[in-house]
Structures are given as structure tokens and as C-alpha cells.
Image (tube, helix red, strand yellow):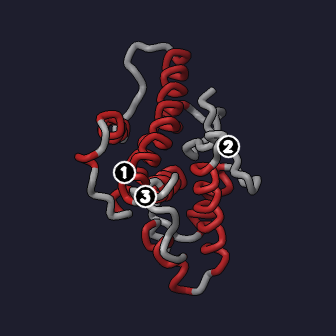
Amino acid sequence: MSGSPSKTSQGRGFDELSRMLDQLGSMTGLSECHGLITGYLCVKREFDGPEELCAILEVPSVRFGNGHSVAILESLASETFRQLESEDCEFQPLLPDDTEPLTDRIAALGEWCHGFLLGVGFSGYQKIPDLAFESREFIQDLTALTRAGTSPGASEEDDERAFSEVVEYIRAGVLLFREEALHRVNPGEEN
């Protein structure tokens, strides 16, 4: 069990949110979209309005005045922010449910990592070389995970266990990276 959430706090499942995002004309899948939002919010505390959020996520619907699409994306961003701010460390990467094939979940994890790295980039954060070793290593690991796959010769049980460990590593790494990045962007502010 990876511990990846299959539902958001609004009760929408991964598949439902994924379909909604597709209907909005997004060029980005849900896991990558969530990674983008997360990476961005690790550096900045909010988006500069719904237009920026939709532009970063490559959702064209805002130009056509589709308030529903803005509400869906804002809800996803605010839920992600709430999880990142939670003292209970509630944050989890948004990935397909554990009932989906492992290969699909691994592919989604790679997309999530790619999105996270893009989100950090879109935030304008340029201090990666100045980060502590652990945070720099985390960014390097995410880069490698964009190309993740199953282990040749490993049992499905071993691959499932490894996947769960990687998801937990990402969850903890995001929180560590965010704390450091926010401190560097806003040195006098308490995170």
C-alpha cells in the first residue's frame, strides 16, 4: 500500500479529477498537475491569481470564462496548500489509487516528480545550489525518478514495497524542501 490518497478532501477521486482536468483541455495529467502545484507552493505561498494558475497548468479554459475550471484548479491548489501547511504532515503526492496497476502508478509518480521540478522552476526559485545537501539531493533524486520503472527480476511484492518507500521519501522530502526554500525566499518569516 503506497499510502497515496485516492480522494481529495472534497471527496473527488483521482479518476474523477483526472477526467475533469482532461475536459478542461489541460495538456498536463493530474499527477503532473499536482506536482506542479506542489513545487510552486513549496517556494511561494500562493498563485498570483487564477490566470497564473491556469497558465502554469496549461489549462486554456480561463480565456473562455469557464469559472468551473478555475474553481476546480483553485480547489486543488488550496487543498495542496492546506496539506503542506498542516502540522500533522498530511501532504501526499496525488497519485492513482493502489488498486491501479503498479506500472501506471510508477508512471504517474514520474510525472508527479517532473511536475514538481517544473513548479519549482515556474516559481522563479534559483537558489538550488545554495540549498543544504539533503534538499539538493532530494531535487537530484526527483530528477532521476522522472525515469522510474520496475526493478528487473524483482517480485511484485518487492516493487510494491519499493514504491511505497519512494512515495514516503517524496512526501517527507517535499516538506523538508519547502521549509528550507520558504526560509530562503522569506528569511525573516516563520514557516
Distance between mark 3 and mark 2 Cα atoms: 37 Å
| Residue 76: assigned label | none
Per the image, the residue denoted by label 3 is: 188
Q: Is tag 1's residue or tag 3's residue first in the polypeptide sequence?
A: 1
Confirm or deny contact between disc 2 and disc 1 (CB under 8 A). Answer: no
Tell me the residue that label 1 is attached to.
117
In front: label 1 or label 3: 3
Q: Is residue 115 left or right of residue 70?
A: left
**Residue 99 in picture, x, y percent from top left:** 66, 33
**For the residue carrying disc 1, how many other residues have a C-alpha within 10 Å: few (<14), some (14-19), or many (20+)?**
many
Q: Quadrant of the N terminus?
A: top right
> Can you identify the residue that label 2 sits on?
6
- Residue 118 position by quadrant: bottom left
Badges 3 and 2: C-beta atoms under 8 Å apart? no
Residue occupying image coordinates x 61% and y 74% = 70
Q: Is residue 175 above or below residue 82?
A: above
